[in-house]
Image (cartoon, rainbow, N blue to C red):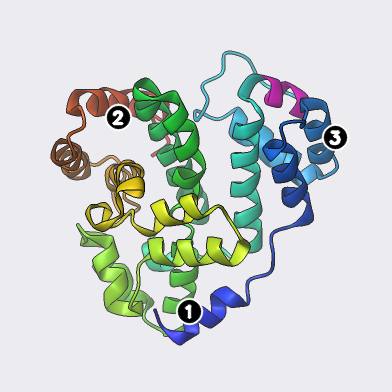
Amino acid sequence: MTKELIDRIRSIPPLPETFIRIDAICSSPNGTISELSKVVEKDPMLVANILKIVNSPLYELRSEVKSVSQAVSLLGMKEINSLSATISVKKLLKVDMEPYGIAPERFALISNMQGALIKKWVGKIDRQKAETLFMPALLQETGKIIIADEIVKNDEVFQFKSDIETAINIPQIERMYVDTTSSEVTAKIFEHWGFDEFLVEIIRYSDQPEIADDEYREYATYLNIAKTALAVNAPLSQRNITIALNHAKKAGFDEKELSESIKLLQESYEGEI
């Protein structure tokens, strides 16, 4: 990783106080829905974003959710904590995804879809693992924001964008230009913010789960498969779905379960991707 990127990460401001309070409530055995709702409701922008996400295809709820307390009751505190983290991270980082050839809104959509795939797929296998993976699935591509900014500063947008457009292995292209990958950058950012070590490590190894320690490998593999199927340059293309299914087979996962989950995801987000 270049010195410029390391310095950029170190200069990122701390996470907002609102998220720190939300995380503390959700991590406490004594935390309550009422207490959490009161903290979230003090931040109107956070409220608007949570309700927007909760009412998106990510959750496929039968009726519109109109209040934070309703959202917390339906989804649970851990899920709201994950959404709050995602929103807080995106607010802190300037989002210009031009080097990757996508608009910020599409980048956010793809991140949400990676989280949705984890919910649909891993949730059928092991609900607790799905809950653990949901936040990193939503956030694992965060490093692309920093890399995109570095590409713009280096005046390499045209060539980088051309290489990304046709890339099968996006991390390989990233490493060619900035000597690191977005997963490694994301892990560094979360280290900087003091996130849980397990979350940091499964993201760090999500490009190469096969070299991760045993305790991280399975989780890193799930993340790798989700972002392979939903690669930012061609999310849910037949090529990327096939590669993701091959990764699943190699890892010993049930390909049929993944394939069925991808089909459900395509139905949920039909017309949006």
Q: Amino acid at mark 1?
A: Leu
The quadrant the C terminus occupies is top left
The residue that label 2 is drawn on is 262
Vertical position of residue 82 compared to residue 62: above or below: below
Per the picture, the main secondary structure of the magenta-coloured stretch is helix
The residue that label 1 is drawn on is 5
Q: Amino acid at mark 2?
A: Ile
Q: Is residue 136 magenta?
A: no
Residue at image position (52%, 50%) is 105
In terms of sequence position, does the residue under pointer 2 or pointer 1 come before the other? Answer: 1
Q: For marks 2 and 1, give the CA distance.
A: 34 Å
In this view, the mark in front (2 or 1):
1
Label ID, residue 38: 3
Residue at image position (59%, 48%) is 86
Answer with the quarter of the image where residue 12 lies. Answer: bottom right
Label 2 SS? helix
Answer with the quarter of the image where residue 120 lies. Answer: top left
Label 3 SS? helix
Q: Tell me residue 59's x, y (percent).
A: 52, 25
The quadrant the N terminus occupies is bottom left
Q: Check disc 1: other Cα within 10 Å, few if <14, some if 14-19, many if 20+.
A: some
Q: Nearer the viewer, residue 153 or 118?
A: 118
Say left or right for 83 vs 266. right
Circles 2 and 1 in contact, beta carbons < 8 Å: no
> Is residue 220 something one can see in this rendering?
no
Residues drawn in magenta = 67-73
Q: For marks 2 and 3, give the CA distance.
A: 36 Å
Q: Tell me residue 214's x, y (percent).
A: 30, 48
In terms of sequence position, does the residue under pointer 1 or pointer 3 come before the other? Answer: 1
Q: Tell me residue 129's x, y (percent).
A: 42, 32
